[in-house]
Image: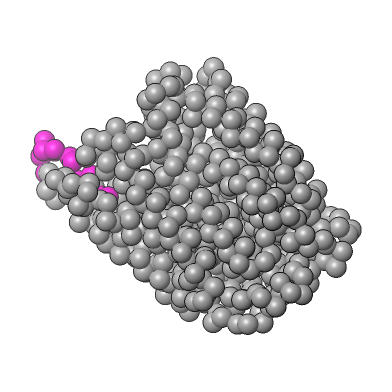
Amino acid sequence: MTSFPAAPSAAPASSIPSRRRWLTLAIVGIAQLMVVLDATVVNIALPSAQADLGFSDGDRQWVVTAYSLAFGSLLLLGGRLSDLFGRKRTFITGLIGFAAASALGGAAPDFGVLVAARALQGVFGALLAPTALAVLTTTFTIPRERARAFGVFGAIAGAGGAVGLLLGGFLTEALDWRWNLYINVAFAIAAILGTILFVGRVESDGPRPRLDLPGTLLVSAGLFGVVYGFASAETEGWDSPFSWVPLAVAVVLLAAFVLWQRRARHPLLPLTIVTERNRSAAYLSILIAGASMFGIFLFVTYFLQATLRFSPIQTGLAFLPMVAMLVLAAQLSTNLLFPRLGAKIMVPVGMILGATGMLLLTRLTVDSIYVTDVLPGLMLLGLAMGSIMPASMQTATLGVDRHFAGVASAMVNTSQQVGGSIGTALLNTIAATATTAYVSEHLADGSAALGPAAVAGYTTAFWWGAAFFAVGALLSAVLFRRRSRTPQATAMTPDEASEAVVVG
């Protein structure tokens, strides 16, 4: 396995007092929850925001797309900036910027300001998300503590979308749509104060590397093209030049980025980080899980609200059992199962659970009942994500030189974001095609109820989601290496390194 020598002058993160390490986890968890739930919390508020500000259905998608475009395209840059300028400083900057952008969006007098605020949220979210994971990576190096910390962080990363649905429903119904943005200010203030008071210095000493400007421009433009292309495919269709042209350009730019990284003196993303077999398997697993889970939130939400007539708050509550199972699985897998079995077993098992949960959801009809027909699938999917995400995150960041912890962490977020963009576009297209085919076949006169047609689209998407998970199970079983007892080269003390159980 490729290893990265730790900076000799780096103070071991284990020197941070234990109490402060766990306070750091709580603070990082708040920041991660804020970023993850913001991808879904605004969705429920969109109808109210549209009625208030008076923008069209065609413009509505930009409230979501503006965030995902900025966030997805700038993640690697955000991670590298945390390597260059220090984790704590970058973390606080990201929190302040995210809070300011949220306050601007909450007070938006018109559609343009709202979209601009959402784009700014994406910019500072791209700074904040990889930095949060990098802080965690460099703070927790003792294997047993690292497992617990990543269990909590992985649960937050997996459950944030569902929590966003619940919080968005409550704030929209009980207060006003603007509070879906204002709430971030409260989260950010709590995290800023906690960071100043309790988070120690978590960066390495030594010479500061330079920013790879050509690499930054190439990868940021390439990721922008990926996210924009898939977002356009969702609304414009795959035959639209707004879909395939950005994707084609993105392929060229990302290929140029890889070639440049091979010769750059100060590469933005050293290719040894992503070509190491275990890490590449972890990034791929996160991408596949992200593609599948975004479909879950999207189509189960549609089914609950359009077919079962759930309110926004009821829809959010309906996802809580999945969140509970996710948290339970994350803690069991990281504290008990992952140290014994490794990612080669944990991730494929999680993928199989995910495929099974998806298959259960393919049985949905217009007459389905939540408790018997929706709940079992959601609970299995919670178990799946609790098995996949913490194990993959640990493996993706284990053994990386601290000088590159930020950009390695950014690859985790990038994988999840790109996976979500791909999954949303593909599954939406598949569902729409299936719905149209059902209408053509069963509702020739166009006068019958369209409910069964919509459900046919959802269930077809669930079949494809099951296929995604099945492919993920196969790839992760093949790509992850068997466990080894050779200690990783990371910033551990000799005693800590002797305890390490390496997944590789």
Nearest the viewer among 59 and 356 is 356
Image-quadrant location for residue 260: bottom right
> Could you say where residue 294 lies in the image, as x and y percent from the top left?
42, 50
- In this view, the residue farthest toward the right is 207
State how the image is colored. one colour
> On the rendered image, what quadrant is the N terminus found in?
bottom right
Image-quadrant location for residue 140: bottom right
Residues in magenta? 444-458
Tell me, yes or no, if residue 182 can be seen here: yes
Nearest the viewer among 501 and 4 is 501
**Count of numbered circles on the image:** 0
Residue at position x 58%, y 75% from top?
A: 503
Residue at position x 34%, y 49% from top?
A: 321
Q: Does 188 sit left or right of 457 as displayed?
A: right
Tell me, yes or no, if residue 425 can be seen here: no
> Could you say where residue 244 lies in the image, as x and y percent from the top left?
49, 51
User: Is 113 covered by the magenta stretch?
Assistant: no
Residue at position x 17%, y 40% from top?
A: 450
Residue 314 to residue 12: above or below: above
Residue at position x 62%, y 76% from top?
A: 502
> On the rendered image, what quadrant is the C terminus found in?
bottom right
> Could you say where residue 466 lies in the image, as x and y percent from the top left?
33, 63
User: Is 456 covered by the magenta stretch?
Assistant: yes
Q: Does 83 sit left or right of 172 as displayed?
A: right
> Could you say where residue 322 lies in the image, as x and y percent from the top left?
36, 51
Nearest the viewer among 286 and 441 is 286
Nearest the viewer among 328 and 402 is 328
Residue 55 to residue 447: above or below: above
